[in-house]
Amino acid sequence: MAERAAAAEPGGAPVRGVALLLCAGTVMSMNGLLFRGVEAATDWQVIFWRSLWMAGVFAVALTVRERGRLDRAFRRAGLVALVAGVILGIGNVSFSLAILNTTVANALLILSASPFLSAIFAWLLMREAIGRVTAVAMVVALAGVAIMVFEGLGAGRFFGNLMAVLTLVTHAGFIVTLRYARNVDMLPSVCIAGCIAALGGAAASAPGFALALSANDFLMCALMGIGTMGLGFALFTMGARYLPAAQTSLLVMSEVILAPIWVWIFWNETPSSLTLIGGALVLSAVFGLTALTMRRGADRAL
């Protein structure tokens, strides 16, 4: 179904999917800015509240859409939505820990390697072809990720970088799951993810878990849950149905580019030299492969 739609669009990629994914990346790029706006809340309090807001927004939206029959949306989505929700829920926790324990640039530039990991997962699960050019680009991107991860050893950011790598794995897994179930409404999976991440945040900080936040921190978590996560993942989930896994990852690169810019402008957070070198390798591989794909045709395996 998605393939027929793709064939009808110029360049083989549905305009709707491209627009949705570019908007998703732009909205989600505000995550780091909002994280830095948190003043006193603990890591796990932030994870709990932002995830609870996200789950609540999707639960309300699905209830309205299904005219009070929320259970119908989950039954229709089935087991694949549960699997996707678990993957995304783990990713939500690891992404929060990454942003809170390393620089925004480090976390997002490591995540920018997701097109290549998505391609590997798609090859393993759906036999989507990986060409020689893509394989070379993967090696270059992996080298860039390695530089950024181990740069954190000396800077006290190693844990945050490892959490970014875990987020990279879950992000790629979620993309491939959406691609695999492209004819299934996967919005319930985002609601499931929010519930799982919120439960994880509460469990990790028990006993003595405090719900109370300052007005500022509560607002930051609400904006993340409703805006960058709620709206962002809604756009992402809808857009990913129209495109192959690797192209989906490429089109949300607006998040990687914009997120470090926001925190640099508003919080004066600057990346290290090794982060810039590693990030340059990853982005060069991503955009180089994108340019070759556009020249040779979206349907040819490179």
Image (cartoon, rainbow, N blue to C red):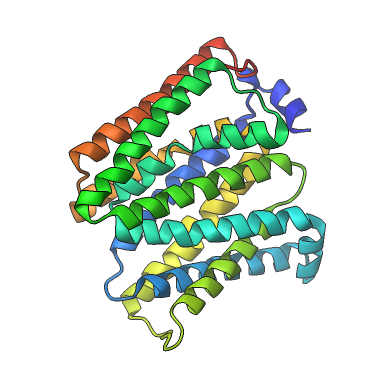
Instruction: Locate residue 81, reporting x and y percent.
Output: 71, 55
Instruction: Locate residue 147, reporting x and y percent.
Output: 30, 37
Quadrant location of the C terminus in the rendered image: top right
Say which quarter of the image contains residue 124. Answer: top right
Does residue 187 sit above or below 201 in this rendering? above
The number of numbered discs placed on residues in the rendered structure image is 0
Q: Quick check: 37 left or right of 244? A: left
Does residue 223 sit above or below 153 in this rendering? below
Q: Quick check: 187 left or right of 146? A: right
Nearest the eye: 163 or 63: 163
- For the question of whether residue 229 can be seen, the reply is yes
Does residue 128 sit above or below 204 in this rendering? above
Q: Quick check: 65 left or right of 118? A: right
Give the residue drawn at x 54%, y 16%: 132
Say which quarter of the image contains residue 98. Answer: bottom left
Quadrant location of the N terminus in the rendered image: top right
Nearest the eye: 171 or 160: 160
Instruction: Locate residue 228, reporting x and y percent.
Output: 46, 56
Residue at the outermost top position: 296
- For the question of whether residue 187 can be seen, the reply is no
Give the residue drawn at x 49%, y 78%: 202
Give the residue drawn at x 67%, y 23%: 9
Say which quarter of the image contains residue 56. Answer: bottom right
